[in-house]
Image (cartoon, grey):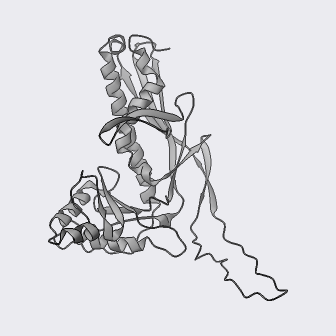
Amino acid sequence: MTVSGTNDRYLRSDVALRVAYEKMEPYLVALDFVRPVPESDGKFMYIYSDTSKSGDTKKKQPVGYTQGGAFPELDFSRPSTAAALMESNGFSVRLPRNVIRQDAGKNEIMRCYENAGFWLAEWLNTKILAAMTGGATTPTWTPTDTWDSPSATPVEDLRLLKYQMRREGYPYRLTDVLVDVDNLSELEAYLTAMDISAVKQERIYGMPGGNGDSIYVPVAGCTVTGLDSGITEGYALAVDKGNPACEYHYYVDPKFGTARITYTTMQDGKKTQKTVPNMGVHFKSFEEDDTHDTIMQFWVEGKPVVINAYGILYDNGI
């Protein structure tokens, strides 16, 4: 049954997705480290590789050329292709009839959208991070000690991790390390306690403080970001933001979602309109016949896949 009443205009998909995305944006950290791939169906193909250009068994070296001779013909190992199915995950929220028919009910509807946005973002982050950690390579480093120890040297650990990311024939370079927020706090405490010149601190070790979300460590060439969920305390997830080794394939059903979503966000302290691709988030509302309650459904259709394990490092010890 179609929903109708005083607040029915707020139950449209475009309104629900706009408000939900406003709440989702600050928490969608993991999407910064994947390559989004829109799909037109519930199933998709993707390409992955476990062979570097340098380690290719078909690799050949240039040879000398003589008049009338021929250059060697090159071939190279082909990447592998895999098939996967889109995954759909969601939940529903029930609103009583009196919420829909009263003017004050708008606030309750908006609160539902905001909560749903936060829950969806938290779930999507965890799902992407789980795929990345599950498909990552374990580095051969040994951190000096856990970062809460007086003998720990977090900056040296990160510097060593930088070179673990380098592999001949692969383009990956360390740009970001994702850790639990407690480990970020320990890094900040380590930097705060250093008795060195301000110039050396800024140019080599990094400056503590800021908003508590991340710290840039110059000597390691990476930004360390602390997450509230998705990364186990004591573990580090190292990635190359410029060369994502994980893809997020998603599908938007035009009946329940729009390809792009425009919402309000803060930029440089000012409110601004932002338009982004819809990463598979859907919404539907309807009135239940027997109770006349309004049921609001939210779901996400998408799946993250790792396309090269050497582009992601994951290990504990910090």
- Between 42 and 249, the one nearer to me in the picture: 249
| Left or right for 80, reference 172 | right
Where 217 sits versus 31, above or below? below
Return the x and y of residue 192 as percentages of the image width and height.
17, 64
Where 233 sits versus 193, above or below? above
Q: Which quadrant: the C terminus?
A: bottom left
| Left or right for 161, reference 212 | right
Return the x and y of residue 185 as percentages of the image width and height.
21, 58
- Between 6 and 90, the one nearer to me in the picture: 6
Quadrant of residue 64 within the rendered picture: bottom right
Return the x and y of residue 229 as percentages of the image width and height.
32, 50
- Between 226 and 199, the one nearer to me in the picture: 199
Return the x and y of residue 284 as percentages of the image width and height.
48, 25
- Between 82 and 253, the one nearer to me in the picture: 253
> Residue at image x 39%, y 47%?
125
Q: Residue furthest right?
A: 68
Quadrant of residue 66 within the rendered picture: bottom right
> Residue at image x 72%, y 75%?
74
> Residue at image x 48%, y 67%?
172
